[in-house]
Amino acid sequence: MPQPKQKPYLTYALDADGKLIHVDCVSTGLACKCFCPHCKSELVAKNGGNRKVHHFAHANGSDCVGAIESALHKMAKDILQEHKCLMLPPVLQNGIETQKTFEKVEIEIFDKELCLRPDCIAYTERDQFIWVEFKRSHEVDVKKAGKIISARVDCIEIDLNSCELDPTKVRNYIESSCEGRKWIYNHENPQTFLICNKNSYAQYHNFDDEYYFEQRMSRHIAVDEQNTIVSLYNLDEIDTNKHSYFCIACGKEVYIDVDDWGNYSFLHLDGNTPCEDDFYLHEAAKKVLYGRFNTLQKFDVYIPQIHLCEKRNQCSFFNETDCSIAIPILYNLKAHGYDSCEIEYKFPNKLFSYDAVLKRSDDLKTAIVIIIDADTCHIEHENLKNRAIEVIVRCENDIFKLYEEPLREER
């Protein structure tokens, strides 16, 4: 049976000047005049014997669980400030990491505009800067990440969980390793996300302190409190300092998540059960088409027109079934009098509402029905006399195409 892992010792503490100092560099006992990096309580130095690992302990006997974390956190900040060198993660996917040397590094400078205090601000020779956040048990939270992304501040997060409380190892990790770091935002690659098919994204949800695993497609489209559609494809639309964002399908609040590779997506807040992928695709497609119709000057649709063989009058084998072809012709419906788009529209005396209906004023005879097929989330339309266009969506890429590409009526 494996032995339980030994609890690490607090070997560094704050001296009277607030600097980290090793236990072997101070007097024994209370004479060390040292304090806990986390709770700032008085410490005793247990460095007088040879049988046990030399370490600090709280004079009041408390077990401060955040002491080592705080010591490691401060050690990383001090090392970066002193040596001004950092290994940056790749800017672009499949890129290479870069070791960067800075002109100066400031620690915990409060940003009044964003009301944030980054761990470090590292300045380049051209007075450009990068925020550096060190992670131990607490990562950059969703509100902070949203502010950083919205403000377009270059920022990386470095995970220190694999580091020991040893300045040599911590420095080597910061300056030479490419592990455990990601961009929260980088101006050279501001549109970082990965479009995936359904059931390709894992999300953990917290309900009454109990976590369960949910497999969901990563999502990049949402709406703000005014029901305006926004997309992570265009970060100029996103500003978490001014807006909250909600699922375009179920309406529950979402936030911007940054995964371990620096890719963005919208996730439901803990406690908000995410809606099904097919429902999300269905509602996103419907609302994107509605928004497109009501904001753009054109709404193009390919309508197939039947063309008969030019030699039909000269051929004894001619028949309309075998000697005809449907050629798609591009029509701007708005130029042909279509002036309204209604979603969830129900025709008189019909059982079901249709996803969207395009109309010329109140003329129902020429109305065009749009039916969105999102796999399990769709309805079979009745035998309407109206022209119907089926829109098939199986992934988010199909949604993004709806922003600009013409619809197609298939024969």
Image (tube, rainbow, N blue to C red):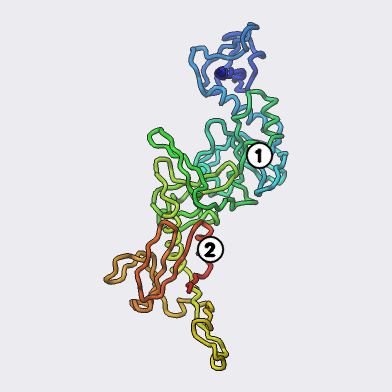
Mark 2 residue crowding within 10 angstroms, few (<14) / some (14–19) / many (20+): some
Residue under label 2: 401
Which residue occupies 49% across, 48% down? 199
Asked if residue 358 lies left or right of residue 238, the reply is left
What quarter of the picture does the N terminus occupy?
top right
Q: Residue furthest bottom?
A: 314
Q: Left of 303 or right of it: where is 178?
A: right
Q: Secondary structure at mark 2?
A: helix
State the image coordinates of residue 63 (x, y, percent, origin top left). 49, 17
Picture coordinates of residue 12, whole percent (x, y): 62, 19
At a point 60% along the width and 38% down the height, the residue shown is 157
Q: Residue at x 44, y 45 (%)?
A: 268
Mark 1 secondary-structure assignment: strand
What amino acid is labelled 2 in the image? Lys
Please state which of the two labelled residues, at mark 1 or mark 2, is closer to the viewer: 2
Measure how far apart labels 1 and 2 are at the Cα level: 40 Å
**Picture quadrant of residue 102:** top right
Measured as percent of width and height from the top left, residue 68 is found at 57, 23
Q: Is residue 64 shown above or below 153?
A: above
- The residue wearing badge 1 is 122
Q: Amino acid at mark 1?
A: Ala
Residue 133 lies, with reference to residue 315, above or below; the image says: above
Residue drawn at point x = 51 percent, y = 41 percent = 144
* Residue 297 in view (yes/no): no
